[in-house]
Amino acid sequence: MFRLIRPLLRPVTYTRWLHVCVPLTFVAVWLFIDMKHFYVPVFLVVPLGLIPAVRLEEALQAQLLLTPDERERPEASISVAPSLTWADRWRTVLWLEARLVSGVLGVLAPVQLLFLSLRLFDAGPWWYALLALLPILAIPVCVVASGTLITAVARVLLGPSRGQRLTALEERTEQLLERNRIARELHDSIGHALTVAVVQAGAARAANDPAFTDRALAAIEETGREALEDLERVLLILREVATPLGQRPSLSEADRLLESARSSGAEVDAEVSGPVELVPGPISREGYRMLQEALTNVLRHSGPVPVRVRIAVVAGQLSLEVTNPLTGSAGRSNGGSGLRGIRERAALLGGTAETGPHGGDWRVYARLPLDGLG
């Protein structure tokens, strides 16, 4: 029973009814001017609907009265925008015609039901009075139904066009890609710094050597300073500041990653071949992050073990390979977000990345075409 009367308790039911009644003011004014040609308003709204700003006005009114819960939401079913194409203009014309029809029918129906109820009440036999209640009970049904119908029509005729939906989808995709990129940046830089700090602190405690402890603290300080700079740069991006703090590191600065791994106790055998400094900026920067995550993965899951790093620029591509002895914990990390980020970075640059066991070692191997951004 409550489900039947619940629509009558919702404020939107009556704002929709108000929206249905508004066109009658236009019709009433015309009938006051010329009642004989009552059909003329149907033709008058045609040139009106072709005006681009009319669509904006109608959409604002419809969103306010028909779907108030969707106001200022990007996924709103009614698009608040002027007509941009002729298709939008003709949809606006159809909407205005639909408003006129719904206004006439939506108001005349309850009025006719009310007159029918009065006639039954005055018809004669007493039991006609009971029948007179039926049209009265039908009036709320008409109010709810007319509001629901005009809302459905508004979503079709005033909803976003195909081009607007495509534009919104592209904007949403760009936002998600940017959020994903920032998440990878934070994971790679902060994750690397924390991993180095944890490994250094543990090694210093176990060594019980003041000189080694001093070196470990210096390495933790340097890594922490770099992480703070990366964090500040990412936060500036989130705040939409145009000029970030410093430039993102590139492969030409890979030595600091290698030294950081060595200071954490890992035996790093590095070999760099080819003109790394000539690698395009975006590829070089992403390659740096991929190397950073690969070394972080080694320290996090295998500890200070021998690591082999190979960076080569040859035949129009950048190849990056990081291998270390395979351990149980490393073998379980194939689905981690860091390694997944390496594969995502490679894919965005038109390259490929492989992470997993290889010949008794754990290997991260990426190939990036130098023209992958073209």
Image (cartoon, grey):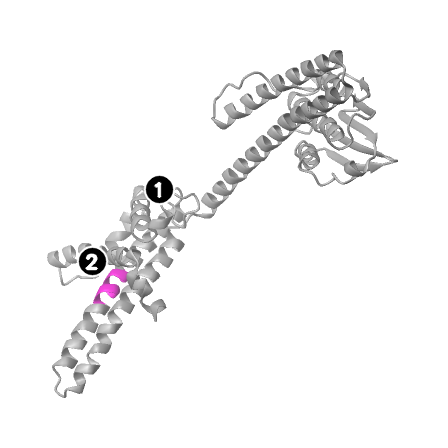
Kindly tell me whether residue 141 is visible in this rendering.
Answer: yes
Kindly tell me whether residue 278 is visible in this rendering.
Answer: no
Residues at marks 1 and 2, CA–CA distance in whole angstroms: 24 Å
Q: Relative to 218, is 186 above or below?
A: below
Give the residue type at disc 2: Leu
Residue 122 location (% of width, % of height): 11, 81
Seen from the viewer's position, the closer of residues 166 and 303 is 303
Q: Residue furthest right?
A: 359
Picture quadrant of residue 27: bottom left
102 in magenta: yes
Q: Is residue 17 left or right of residue 341?
A: left
Residue at 74%, 35% (x, y): give it: 352
Query: Would you call the spot at circle 2 few (<14 residues within 10 Å), some (14-19), or many (20 or more)?
Result: some
Residue 106 location (% of width, % of height): 26, 64
Q: Which residue is mark 2?
A: 24
Mark 1: secondary structure: loop
Residue at 65%, 18% (x, y): give it: 223
* Magenta residue span: 101-108
Residue at 20%, 58% (x, y): give it: 24
Query: Would you call the spot at circle 1 few (<14 residues within 10 Å), some (14-19), or many (20 or more)?
Result: some
Q: Which residue is mark 1?
A: 82
Give the residue type at disc 1: Pro
